[in-house]
Image (spheres, rainbow, N blue to C red):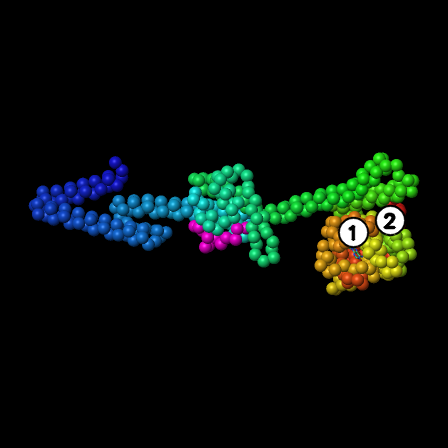
Amino acid sequence: MNSIWWRLLTVLGSVGSVGAALAYFQGWGLGLGFLVAALLALWLRDQRHLSALERWADLDRKAALPPASGPWDHIFAKLYRQSRESERQHAALTDALVSFRRAAQALPDGVVMLNDTSQILWCNGQAEQHFNLKLETDAGQSVTNLLRAPDFLSYLASGEWDLPVELRMRLGGQGGDRILSVQLVEYGNAQRLLLSRDITKIERLETMRRDFVANVSHELKTPLTVLAGFLETIREVKLPARQQEHYLALMSEQAERMQRLVADLLTLSALEADRGPSAESIDMSALCARVEAAAAELSKGRHALSFTADRDVNLLGSETEIASALTNLVTNAIRYTPDGGKIRVDWSRVEIGGSVYAQFAVVDTGIGIEAHHLPRLTERFYRVDRGRSRGSGGTGLGLAIVKHVMTRHQGRLEITSTMGSGSRFAALFPAARIIGRQALAQREIERRDAA
Ligand code: ADP
């Protein structure tokens, strides 16, 4: 028997004993009167405590229970202890829930918690963005009302969720489509997690890779087909010596074209694989002189070339890479400027928008480029006029190489052009890469001493 019953029995026993003693010594009337009064007092005390208990339960469970007497003291203390304990557990659970939600909010992926009937219980901010949801208003709604993509609905209905499904989500405005990798995971009591990952960039890279491979194959296929055709003709038909000579010349032209393409591809892949350019000190007037000689060789006197170079502007960087980029710009100017045109090249220090740069500017009076092509010129294999590019020995990779080299040297390429009157290509190197004539000479001495 627990202590409450003992206490009750003790109290009743004491009241009964006093009542019996009074009845025995003072008569039945007094004994019964005492008993009734004592039981009434006990009943009133219980009512008072009951009402205090009710008030506590209804209004303020956090407050301490009022002081009590008799067995109520014991009950109130126990209740108070239990209420404190459950409060502590509640606070710990709330903390755990808050930190769980914070962790889920910090995830780079979207998370939507669904119940067994696919109603949304909760979701993080990423999921709100991915699926265009608003937790405040969408909680409790079935996910099928909000995510209506047929691919998702059939994925949900299939119940086979071992692998993710790809969904293309339409974004409003100019944003283009967003591609999501979405997977359902079951947990707990038939509840589900809907996980989403934005794979738009990965998909875009994959598309670029596929296009690149297709472009390279196409670029190689054409000269190979020509070569194979001529070879077959030469083997099968006895051609006059002059015609055979002509075919052989065409074949070696195609072989050279393939060689140039492979060389440019190797340059691009070396630029991509390498970590960063070396910090050689480059004598830029010597480099400009070499570019000028190559330009004269290519132009063969068909253009008026003018080169100027500030001897006090030299660079820190990779000489091979920079020579390749600058030669590319000058070569293009010659290739896209009709005979009799002018090409002006200037290497100097300039100030643009308050910042100092070393600038290699190539201005030609050539065919020019329509404005809408300009942003795409540095893409691999992008050509304004495919036939003209091929005809003048272009691979379509030159400006892609230039852009890579400039980015690796924290520089940039600026292109302006007017259709029919010419173009200006300016390679801008940041001030941090510029060294003066004296610093160049000093470094040259140090390099020789070290060698
Ligand atoms: P390509 O080998 O075809 O010249 P590039 O990447 O060097 O490839 O150049 C891309 C395209 O930019 C060229 O096909 C050409 O249409 C255009 N282009 C480049 N430089 C000039 C220029 N100086 N004048 C006119 N068009 C140019």
Q: Nearer the viewer, mark 1 or mark 2?
A: 1
Picture coordinates of residue 370, whole percent (x, y): 74, 60
Mark nearer the N terminus (1 vs 2): 1
Picture coordinates of residue 97, whole percent (x, y): 47, 47
- Judge from the rendering whether residue 158 lies leftward or rightward of residue 320; answer left or right: left
| Quarter containing the N terminus | top left
Q: Which residue is mark 2?
A: 446
Tell me which amino acid carries mark 2: Glu
Tell me which amino acid carries mark 1: Gly
The residue stretch that appears in magenta: 130-141
- Judge from the rendering whether residue 51 lies leftward or rightward of residue 212; answer left or right: left
What SS does tag 2 mark?
helix
- Tell me if residue 220 is in the magenta stretch: no
Q: Which residue is mark 1?
A: 387
Give the quarter of the image for residue 314: bottom right
Dot 1 beta carbon under 8 Å from ligand 1: no
Residue drawn at point x = 31 percent, y = 53 percent? 58
* Disc 2 crowd, CA 10 A, few/some/many (<14, 14-19, 20+): few
Name the one closer to the observer, 387 or 105: 387
- Tell me if residue 133 is in the magenta stretch: yes
In the rendered image, is residue 92 in sight? no
Mark-to-mark CA distance, 1 and 2: 50 Å
Name the one closer to the observer, 311 or 33: 311
Picture coordinates of residue 121, whole percent (x, y): 45, 48
Picture coordinates of residue 331, whole percent (x, y): 84, 53
